[in-house]
Image: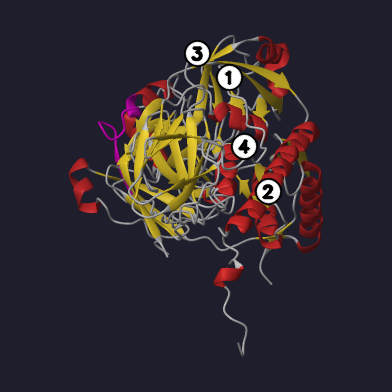
Amino acid sequence: MPATTTPTPVEVFESGDAALRVVATSANSEANWSTVHALAEWLEAAGADGVHGAVPTYDSLLVEFDPGVTSARQVRAFVLLGMRQLDFIGAPVRAPREFSVPVVYGGEYGPDLERVAEHQQLPVEEIIALHTAKSYVIRCLGAPAGSPMMDGPDFPIPVPRLKDPRLSVPAGAVAVAGRQAVIAPAMAPGGWCVIGQTPLAVLDAGSEPLVPYVPGDLLRFRQIQPEEFAHYAGRKLEAAR
Amino acid sequence: MSGSLIILQPGNSVVTDLGRFRGPRFGLPVNGALDQFSARAANILAGNDDNAPLLEVTALDFRLKATTDILIAVTGAPLHLTVGGRECQQWEPVSVRAGETVALRQITGGLRAYLAVHGSVEAPVLLGSCAPDTVVGFGLRLAEGTELKTSRTVAPIRQPYFDLPLFRLGLTRPEFSSQAVVEVTDGPDVEEFGDTADLLYTTEYTVSARSNHIGLRLGGALPERQSGAEVLSRGVPVGAIEVPSREELLVLHRGRGVTAGYPVLAVVTSRSLDVLAQARPGHTITFRRTTVPDATAKYRAALRELENLRSTVSTVFALLGIGSQPGWQQLAPAAGT
């Protein structure tokens, strides 16, 4: 028998005529996270006509559907059926893989590093030390293009988003915001504070499912020097174990 | 027999379909034709499946040359359509002879036109869709000289009465206006905006030139969030209205990033997303509040209209011997004859 956890209660909110937002409402954020991911997998596996898919993040899940085929009311019933199933069988827990990500911090690679250090009232070295101090759980795949969204480093205070988001952040940008951390798999606009960049290729648009990790996998950053960037450039991100 | 066409003047055009519906769970936007009604109508008028690859032409003039006989339909924003120099109607199937040039000029009133070819065009596919994704760099962006293959040719349709439109298929064309009304339902986070949420319904907004397929940026009086707490990233629907800065309202469209950390004030209905797809910079937009059941009913009414169009088109096509259903002429002789 695979390991399971008990799902938490959820609430379902309207989110337009083609989506619902499902929010896990317990005080335990870890349990909320496993619940919404288990529910997403259940919805995916069960399948229902007109339901396009589910996007689970931290404590919530966006379920998208075709209102020409089904309706918010029917999809809500489908979601609640899924929750009853999970209550009965438990939410499965999967063994994580681990990824190691080399990062050049600061300078042109991490234009916001000093600003973040100033805001945290810590030296730059301490920011890097905190960022590389532990493995992060990949909580979900986000924008753009399957970004690994992680619980951020143990900074003293949340990192504010940029007042004016950048129109373009390069692929491999390593960024923080609030209490979250992320790598940008592809060039895109962004409002997060970019503190470094990895030379590894995170995204492979020629393969499915585009990125090598799934929610629940572990990722750890390690510092490399700017002169090492070229050595790693273009290599694919692969699981260390 | 397969046909082909060659792009002479690409303007700003792509090959797309209704979208990458499996994308969002991998962190990819759904993308696809921004004006879904016009895209579906173009495909139906060309005798294709709704979701067949077709051309989306945005804002700029566009020309192609048919190297074989083909049948096309052009929908979307009003424009000046000519085939071999002859003026032709939008929202109708149009016969194009080998060697003739199809020109879409002076897109006005709206922003995006759709050109479907009977038998569709070939395009690469990612996660079940040919829709371009600018973020991962996927998709077929058309350039001068690009050759597109179609799976079928269609002999020119003989027109028995000169100067009469060949088809009168009775579709109500969408209205295109520089003062659009867009219907929305309350977003899941509407309460975070307190009384200022009402500004959304009393303000006339202006479409900014920074708008694109990811989202429209609108200038005008902005509802304000009453708390400043950071929000955990979460999935946001296409059509979500956010207030990410003090300058503009952001209305997410089909190219939107799947997750975001801003509260969702309201969500544009599926029908009204088509209206937004045609809004040009400088156009004004007012929002009207509706309910999910009403929005669903309107969406389904539009789908019914497209179904009616499909049945009319297939009847006409069957009479003319066009279409995926083989005509009696093409059937193999019965055994023994």
Which numbered disc, 2 or 4, marks the residue that appears first in the sequence? 4
First in residue order: circle 4 vs circle 3: 4
Circles 2 and 3 on the same subunit: yes
Cα distance between the residues tagged 3 and 1? 25 Å
From the viewer's perspective, is the residue at label 2 or at label 1 nearer? 2
- Tell me the kind of residue under disc 1: Ser
Q: CA distance from mark 2 to mark 1?
A: 28 Å
Q: Which residue is mark 1?
A: B177
Question: Sequence order check: which comes first, mark 2 or mark 1?
Answer: 1
Percent from the top left, x then y, of residue B48? 56, 53
Camera-side residue: B4 or B17? B4
> Depth-wise, is mark 2 or mark 3 nearer the camera?
2
Q: How many marks?
A: 4
Q: In the orientation shown, which residue stands out farthest toward the bottom?
A: B336
> Three-letter amino acid code at disc 3?
Glu
Q: Where does the image place residue B160, in percent across and percent down from the top left?
A: 55, 46
One can see residue A81 in this view = yes
What's the amino acid at mark 4?
Answer: Pro
> Which chain letter matches label 4?
B
Q: Which residue is mark 3?
A: B247
Residue occupied by mark 4: B237
Residue, disc 2: B312
**What element does badge 1 sit on?**
loop
Q: Which residues are magenta?
A: A102-114
